[in-house]
Amino acid sequence: MYIALFIACCLCGVLPVIGQETAENAPEKRLIAYWSFDEGEGLTVADHSGSGYHGKIANDMRAVKWVDGYKGKALAFDSTLPKGEKNTAGAVVVPRFPTDFSQGLTVACRVKMDAKADWQRRVYNLVTFSAGTYGPGFILYYNWRYYMFLSGPGGADGHKTKWDVRAAVPDLRDQWVHVCATFDGKKGRMYIDGKMLAESPEEVAYYPQTSKTSTLTIGSGWAGQANGFPGIIDELKIYNYPLTPSEIINQAKLD
């Protein structure tokens, strides 16, 4: 029947659109959230994308302070906390953030790690949107001389089933760095200052959390419970599609 319809449409000069339903159901590519951190005071961090994903500085500004940023103001997270001490880090929490980025994702920000931070033997979370250490969801973080991005299904074997991309970096303390992770539906990539330094060697999948929305944490893991970043975070943007290499270069070099 479909073949007959196709022939009839061709005779009339009208071609049926194959796969139209899939295209229509695909999410609109857009900037999901943009936190400039330019408030300079208070507990609220506004989302300037228009999506309304406003954040709140958790725990009465514990281990967080307003400072001058890469552009305007920014948030500095404390770097003096003892290694292994739990639930002491600073954090911005964003409730009800959308969880499904299986078709694409970009997470980009400016960071300035403290000059005295341990940059060789510590783990620091920049953006945590994962139920656990290995998913489901994603984490953008620093780990023993690497800026990294991961996603995985979590669970008891999460350390075996997760995937990550690792951008090896030299000592970049006390200087502004543009950190960007992308996922295009098949591969993850890490960019530092506009240059791609890592790519997943094979095709991978994004593992969304089971709920449609969840809480995103900026500056540490899980609302300040672990892995607090020692330094400043500014100009954080999240897209629901992968930026192109040229777009990332423009952000890193021109914005």
Image (cartoon, grey):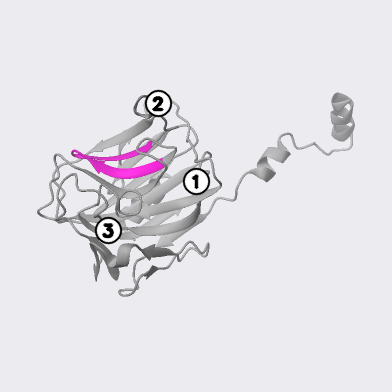
Q: What element carries label 2?
A: helix
Circle 1 residue: 241
Image: magenta residue range: 138-150
Circle 3 residue: 90
Q: Nearer the viewer, residue 2 or 234?
A: 234
Q: Position of residue 65 (x, y in %)?
A: 24, 67
Image quarter hosting the C terminus: bottom left
What residue sits 34% from the left and 71% below the top? 38
Identify the mark nearer the N-term, 2 or 3.
3
User: Alpha-carbon distance for marks 1 and 2?
Assistant: 24 Å
Q: Which mark is on residue 170?
A: none
What residue sits 30% from the left and 39% below the top? 148
Q: In the image, is residue 15 above or below residue 35?
A: above
Identify the mark nearer the N-term, 3 or 1.
3
Q: Where is residue 101 in the image (x, y as percent from the top left)?
A: 50, 43
Q: What element carries label 1?
A: loop
